[in-house]
Amino acid sequence: MMKETTIQDILNLFESIEQKNTEISAVWHEGVVFTRPWWIMIGLLVLPWCLFWLFRKKSSTHRLMFAGFFVYVVASTADSLGVPFGLWCYLVTPLPYLHTFYQPLDLSMLPVFTMFFLQVRPQTSPLGKALLYAGVLAFGAEPLLIRLDVYRQLEWSHLYSFPCYVLIYLAAHYMSRRRDFAPLE
């Protein structure tokens, strides 16, 4: 059984979080929604999926979506850890209360970019593709998001992102090659 003082401390902290969320929402409504960076984020949320549906290998849609969903879960989990620990932050979010979920990078850009890499030249070395994938994301996409004022690295570096992206791609590649699914009966 927890002590009553511990319970009260936790409730007080949640009250503080609620107050900060209210403040973030006010700032979001006054200075973020409908700004140029906000529209860019909305575009980055929608456009990759439109391109995926147009250019996907239709016979591999479910396999690609399985790998893409895996990438989304990993990326969202990373953001759920990185943002609260002050490693990075998002200055622009599609909605005010979702600071780490439904980020275009997690929900759209990373999964779709991964699925694109998986379907193009499938016989190419996964490690080579992972290195290219990580380089484009860590040293191309992240600096671009910083220049667009939608993302900031606080205690993080592109150099830290690079091996993370390599591992994410290699794991997604592995997931996309599984043949372990049996029909449901």
Image: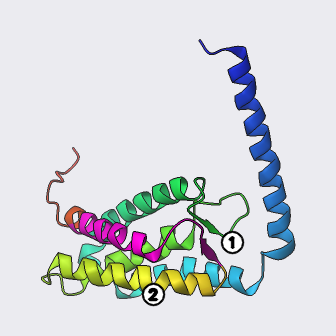
Determine if the magenta segment contains residue 13: no
Left-right relation of 118 to 125: right
Residue farthest to the top, as pictured: 1
For label 1, the SS is loop
Question: Is 108 or 21 nearer to us in this picture?
Answer: 21
Q: Which mark is residue 20?
A: none
Circles 1 and 2, Cβ within 8 Å, touching? The answer is no
The quadrant in which residue 103 appears is: bottom right
Residue 6: x and y in percent read 68, 22
Quadrant location, the N terminus: top right
Q: Position of residue 48 (x, y in %)?
A: 48, 82
Residue 168 is one of the magenta-drawn residues? yes
Give neighbour class at mark 1: few <14, some 14-19, many 20+ (Cα, 10 Å): some
What residue lies at 64% left-to-right and 86% top-to-bottom? Answer: 148
Seen as rendered, the residue at the extreme front is 155
For the question of whether residue 43 can be seen, the reply is: no
Q: Amino acid at mark 2?
A: Gly
Residue type at mark 1?
Answer: Leu
Q: Which residues are magenta?
A: 150-173
Q: Nearer the viewer, residue 165 or 160?
A: 160
Residue 150, percent from left and from top: 64, 78
Q: Residues within 10 Å of mark 2 (few under 14, many from 20)?
A: few
Residue hosting label 1: 91
The residue wearing badge 2 is 140
Q: Is residue 73 left or right of residue 170?
A: right
